[in-house]
Amino acid sequence: MENNLTRRRFIKKAALGTGTALAASSIPLFAIGHSQFKLSDINLGAISYSFRSMPSSAEDILGYLTTAGLNTVELMGGAIEGFGGAPEGPGWKRGPLTDEEKAERAKHREDMKAWRLKTPMSKFKALKKMYNKEGVKIEIVKFSLDRMSTEEADFCFNVAKTLGAKGITLERTDEAVKQLAPLADKHKTLIGYHNHAKVNFNSWDAALDYSKYNALNLDVGHYVAGTN
């Protein structure tokens, strides 16, 4: 019985995600012998990470979405903050960093913190307006909250609310699901933890107990690979 309850709870909490999980109210009903289906009945979207090999400003991403006929997006923090005028940082690099590269990244983190603590929400109201004008809703935003100070995380929650997002996503770690729970409670905003393959069915039990706002950003492919 306990296992069944846990599974039902799992499914209920898994509803955070653009194109990852669908709430029951979004699924059209089919009567026997009557299989009419309207694409407009479902919100189709993508995470902006899907376009990472192309120019990835907020404006660029909006163009890709509208060209593809998508009406919702999980928008990565880089595009959001870039639109708001955030300082540019060093590019991503695979493998070990030199001391100089580490220092460069440390300075950029400090620059980003200073920028976040002084930037008004009006920047992000303009971003929401731009997307909504083209019929695209910013459903979810992605920020690495677990790598930020509390003040910076507060800023990101406020950005999410300003954009009209239902929640924030980030990568799941045992530390993050516990550390960020009080902030999720404070802001009354969902945090969807994205799973990679190193999870099993019980990986979420404690996470979901820490806060009613802790949720799953369920990657079905990774989940199956991790629990198969």
Image (cartoon, rainbow, N blue to C red):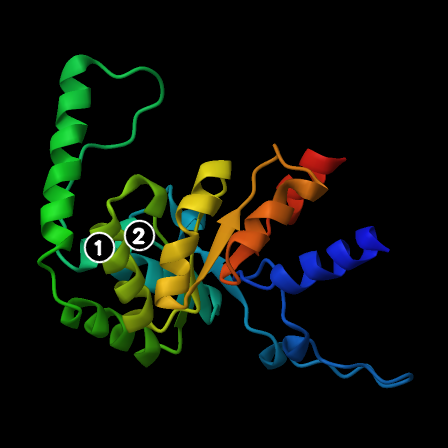
In the displayed structure, does residue 223 sit left or right of residue 179?
A: right
**Residue 100, placed above or below residue 167:** above
Give percent across and percent down for residue 192.
Answer: 49, 55
Residue at image location 48% in from the left, 68% down from the top: 70
Three-letter code for the amino acid on which mark 2 is drawn: Gly
Give percent across and percent down for residue 101.
Answer: 18, 21
In the displayed structure, does residue 142 sit left or right of residue 34?
A: left
Three-letter code for the amino acid on which mark 1 is drawn: Glu
Judge by depth and name the residue closer to the eye, 209 or 60.
209
What mark, if any, has residue 81 been given in the picture? 1
What mark, if any, has residue 77 been given in the picture? 2
**Residue 105, placed above or below residue 171:** above
- Is label 1 in a helix, a strand or a loop? helix
Pointer 2 and pointer 1: residues touching (CB < 8 Å)? yes
Spatial CA span between label 2 and label 1: 6 Å
Judge by depth and name the residue closer to the eye, 57 or 123.
123
